Amino acid sequence: MNQKTKQVCARCIMDSSVPNIQFDSQGNCNYCTDFLERCAHVLDDTSEVKAKKLQALVAEVKRAGRGKRYDCIVGVSGGVDSSWVLVKCVELGLRPLAVHMDNGWNSELAQNNIANLVQTLGVDLHTHVIDWPEYKALMQAFFDADVLDVELLYDNAALAVNYRAGATYGVKHILAGTNSATEGMSMPPGWNWNKFDKRNIKAIGKRFTQTRVRTFPSIGTFDFFRFRFVNGVRWVSILDLMPYNKAAVLKELQEKYGYKPYPYKHYESIFTRFYQGYLLPKKFGVDKRKLHLGTLVAAGQMDREAALRDLEGIPYVSEAQLQEDKLYFMKKMGWTQAQLDGYIARPPVAHDVYPSEVRLWDFATRTLTALRSLRSR
Ligand SMILES: [Zn+2]
């Protein structure tokens, strides 16, 4: 789309290049309007309902964890959100096990952040180191398939590792860094893929790689329902139950836990920052900063002008860092410059061109929601 004709939302920073965007008569877009309506209760830090819910959750976690070594699992990535959950859990008197999935792309900064945090808090850390040859083969398969969500591999494996840890330790609550205040604006269609689509991972892996994938931790619809209803493991976005201001939290993490920040969301992984900062915009025309910074702007946590200025630059701290990451990526994947250029030039292919369980997932989760609303009537 022509830069000059591009309409930018008057309230957040989403623009007319984003799929399914609509503007109202005030020039506000449907993404931030829907977000502010849907998450009003979460964004209201004075809400007593929220405080009561947190109290009830803490009591429930403690009750369910009685007699067990841990009473909750906290998945940590080294990012701000999950680091803060761990801090709050300890402050609230919970006994978390920190769980980390290492896919071989962690930045040194992320490793140090996690190590500092668990040491200072005195929390046990379980790190699942993924089998690199398998993971690399699956990544290569996703590149060969030209599908957009290469991070589905990380996200699905991380979900699997967290739910498994819950089942292994008999823990009923996974307290996660997922939250509405800083990530509640809906992902535009086509900007990612369903994170429980194990079938899609398997199908793409089978089609494009000779490597036998035996140990990759994955989770699909049936696994999710088994963990949820047989093992009784629940995923809780605990940050939605407390005030959560990213800038304030970052300051406290830096001062008390020697935490080192990253320039953008999810940049704790070298692949993620190369993916979000280069591959996604170049090959797929997707700039996730619009969503991440736009959410912060809509939630009143970031100045709109500052976010717009930020968007004008490349999604990287510097051109030098981008070049460094590009070389690192090519070396680690065993690619030449020509292979990278070829990949960028090829047109994207939709995930559901390959077998997928998205319909099963949608059906199962819709049915569950319907049953719950029937029961609460
Ligand atoms: Zn907007």
Image: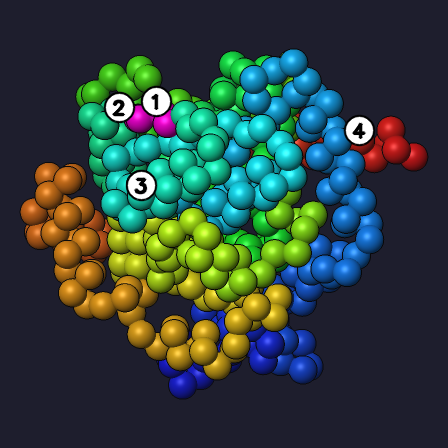
How many angstroms separate mark 1 from mark 2 (CA)? 7 Å
The quarter of the image holding the C terminus is top right
Residue 202 falls within the magenta-colored stretch: no
The residue at 41%/25% (across/down) is 126
Q: Is label 1 or label 2 in front?
A: 2
Upstream in sequence: badge 4 or badge 1: 1
Q: Which mark is residue 111?
A: 3
Asked if residue 323 can be seen in this view, the reply is yes
For the residues labelled 1 and 2, say whether their Cβ atoms are less than 8 Å apart.
yes
Residue 371 is marked as 4
Q: Give, as a three-letter code, the residue at label 4.
A: Leu
Q: Secondary structure at mark 2?
A: loop
Q: Residue at x 35, y 55 (%)?
A: 260
Mark 3 surroundings: few (<14), some (14-19) or many (≥20) residues within 10 A: some
Predominant SS of the magenta segment:
strand
Say if mark 4 contacts mark 2, CB within 8 Å.
no
As helix, strand or loop, the secondary structure at mark 4 comes to helix
On whether ligand 1 comes within 8 Å of the CB at mark 4, the answer is no
The amino acid beneath tag 2 is Asp
Task: Determine which residue is flagged by label 2.
Answer: 131
- Three-letter amino acid code at disc 1? Phe
Mark 3 vs 1, N-terminal side: 3
Q: Which residues are magenta?
A: 127-131
Residue 336 position (above or below residue 320): above
Q: Which mark is residue 216?
A: 1
